[in-house]
Amino acid sequence: MGLQKLIQCEKFGGEMRSAGTAALSCVRLLAISWVSPAFSQKTECVKVNPCKCTMKDGSGVINLAAMGDSDGFLERDKQLPSSAGDADAEILYSFSPCHPFSEPPEYAPQCLNVAVCLILRYRTPRGEIKRFLNFGRHEDSEFSYNNVTDSLSVTYRASHSSILHTVVQYNCTSKRSVVLFRDPEQPNVLQINVSSPCACPNGCKPEDVGPGTIILIVFSISVAAYFLFGLCGLNPIRTPNGIELIPKENTWCSLCYACVERRGRNRPDYGSPS
């Protein structure tokens, strides 16, 4: 069963979900019985927020913000292999482990402030048609840590009433890789396997602007302003003793005149004595 039928099922479920019958039909139709192996293990990493969790044994913190690029994406518009039910469509997906993102709202109202979004592109004689699917949000994400494999499993659900969700397994390894699994029999589930040293407790820290960086920025601006002021306010003149920098009269006089004129305008006028 392809994503086309999944979209139809989602629409049907949205219309009839209040009666409680559509959701049950969709569950039976899609046979969603897949359960992540990590859920069978005891959770040892306590969720702090959608970006990180703290190990119960005190070994450190797993920070998912360190895995994304400068825009927060771990994967951006990456192509997925099409299944038999979606052979006529090009499927792309984007995933941000920490920061919510949105596709253009005029084209993708479904993918606003999401963690995972799928894009289906269909080429027709009239042009390209795009359909967007929200496959998970950061809100109410579920964290589970596997003590045996040293991996963190996070489930991102599209909504409380939707059957669409993404399960990401973060593996603590020295190498980096991202592998996506998609079972044609369960198109409502997207599985992503991420291997990274950032999945280890205290393995990576997100880049942040610290005091040292701020001091360096202020110093650089000061040096640039000093040289710029020297070029504008000083005039190099060759003398018998060498080159000397002489203040430019026009520049300094203009500054003094501007200050005096501004003070004159701001001075209150009490009027002439009667």
Image (spheres, rainbow, N blue to C red):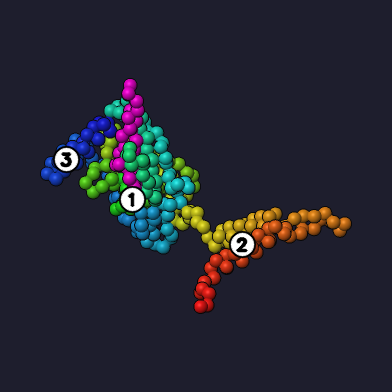
Query: Callout 1 environment at 10 Å: few (<14), some (14 to 19), or many (20+)?
Result: many
Residue visible at 51% across and 78% down in the picture: 274
Query: Callout 3 environment at 10 Å: few (<14), some (14 to 19), or many (20+)?
Result: few
Residues rendered magenta in the picture = 109-135
Give residue 204's position: percent from left, percent from top. 48, 53
Residue visible at 68% across and 61% down in the picture: 253
Residue visible at 51% across and 74% down in the picture: 270
Image position of 194 with respect to 269: above or below: above
Q: Is residue 79 visible?
A: yes
- Location of mark 1 (residue): 138
- Specify the quadrant of the image occupied by residue 55: bottom left
The disc placed on residue 5 is none
The disc placed on residue 15 is 3
Q: Magenta stretch containing residue 121, yes or no?
A: yes
- Location of mark 2 (residue): 258
Q: Which amino acid type is shown beneath numbered disc 2?
A: Ala
- Specify the quadrant of the image occupied by residue 228: bottom right
CA gap between label 1 and label 2 equals 55 Å
